[in-house]
Amino acid sequence: MTESGYVTACRAVYVGSNPALGSRDKMTLRVFNTLTGKKEEFRSLKDKKVKMFVCGMTVYDYAHLGHARTYAFYDTLVRFLRFLGYEVTYLQNVTDVGHLLDTGEDKVIKKAEEERKHPMEVAEYYLKYWLEMIEKLRLLKPDLMPRASEHIKEIIEQVETILKNGYAYVSNGSVYFEVSKFKDYGKLSKRVSKELVAGARVEINPDKKNPRDFVLWINAPKEHILKWSSPWSEWGYPGWHIEDTAIAIKYFGPQYDIHGGAIELAFPHHEAEVAQAETTTGIKPYVKYWIHTGLLTVNGTKMSKSLGNFVRLEVALEKHGAETLRLLFASTKYRKPLDYNEKNLEVARKKVEKISSTLERIEESIKRATDKEPAFINKLEKLRERFLAAMTDDINTPLALACFFETLSLVNKQIDENKFSKEDLGEAEKMIYELAEFFQIIPSKKEIKIPKEIEELIKKREEARKKEDFKTADEIRKKIKELGYLLEDTPKGPRVKKI
Ligand SMILES: [Zn+2]
């Protein structure tokens, strides 16, 4: 079993031109760009605006943990870019048509046939499910979620342009991109020509000039359930890759800042996108930064349908909670493989507990604050700086988390030693919330189901306290305790815990 990549020490990272970490809009972010194969300084194409496209879900099935890991990373990236002062437009498309299986069948249509439903009913169901998952996993809702089936006009126009520019051909009513005509093919995934053929599944398609060519538009028989009229055949539907570029160019123009997705999409999906866009517009590079996430394995094995080891997201969320999953995801560098196993989950769970207990301690200790402790604040500032420096260094979340947990340890130590003022703790609490926000790891207040009877008693006790009848108030507290609940008075009012 591989372990998650927890870093134990909050060390300083030297980030080239980051002299003023205190001033967030002067910080320089560096990211690893798959296109250049290097870690580069991030500079948006226009002003402080960032356009980011992340390949969205194919809405034909439930999401699994691999999806969750990927989208959790882009969520952190968007939050951090916004923190740095960028105005981010986050687009995540919805593939409701055109994503083909190896057999050539459309995923959504096949599912619809199995379930005896209309394909759009299937798409609707899984899209609704995905929107729920976005909320449950505490992901920001993308600013734009365009659906492929609503962009057929743009897709047809783009295929026409590629044909007109001489990079595609019509064969038997379908349209194929002619890979040999686009000399840059392979520049993103770094695959050379031979590999492109050797790596491709042997496909017997007499309509293609070359097995490497990929489909832009598919001729469909009359009985095909989802179809649109096209200039090349009476009926047809789009291929998978073309929807991304048709949508991206419509909303973002011929060039934009970031394209994201899991690394296994780099070839052929993203490679095909580069080919389509650059032969449509002639503008290079189509996307400035290609940022890919690594694989997620389950108990050391790749998830696959045949192995039956897919962990469905809603099941994992129900079992472990969003904060434990998000902490687990952030514990490993986004580009590295991450293993989902009980041991790693246990570590994540304990860390989430540490966050809760530290926040509780802050709340309780604030009442007995002592004098100001300047060294405490200085240490907090240093940790915050290191946290942010780690984030600017290619979103190094394991290192940033190490700084975050060192902050918690520091707070606990200061409380143990009774060396803190009200302001110090207030500052620490603010910082914990601020930094945790990037990963969404603060546990949501556990909902304790309080019986009506207890609620009534709390109310009565509050009334007694208001009348300064402390004797009755104490008696009620005792009664609450007998019933199995511990009542505490906090600055925010009374709070009950189950004993
Ligand atoms: Zn895509």
Image (tube, rainbow, N blue to C red):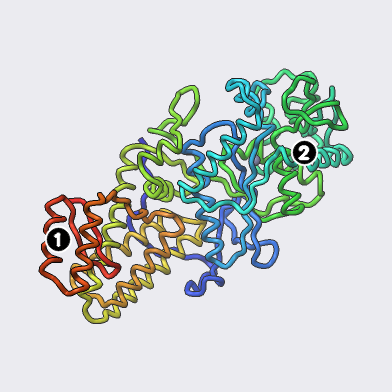
Mark 2, secondary structure of its residue: helix
- For disc 2, the marked residue is 152
Image spot of residue 257 (x, y percent): 66, 56
Of badges 2 and 1, nearer the viewer stands: 1
- For disc 1, the marked residue is 476
Image spot of residue 317 (x, y percent): 41, 41
Q: Amino acid at mark 1?
A: Ile
Mark-to-mark CA distance, 2 and 1: 68 Å
Q: Nearer the viewer, residue 88 or 215?
A: 88
Q: Nearer the viewer, residue 209 or 144?
A: 144
From the viewer's perspective, is 327 left or right of 489?
right
Estimate how packed mark 1 is, as few (under 14), some (14 to 19) or many (20 or more) residues with alpha carbons within 10 Å: many
Q: Are marks 2 and 1 in contact (CB under 8 Å)?
A: no
From the viewer's perspective, is 55 left or right of 72?
right
Queried on whether the Cβ of the residue with tag 2 lies below 8 angstroms from ligand 1, the answer reads: no
From the viewer's perspective, is 167 left or right of 118?
right
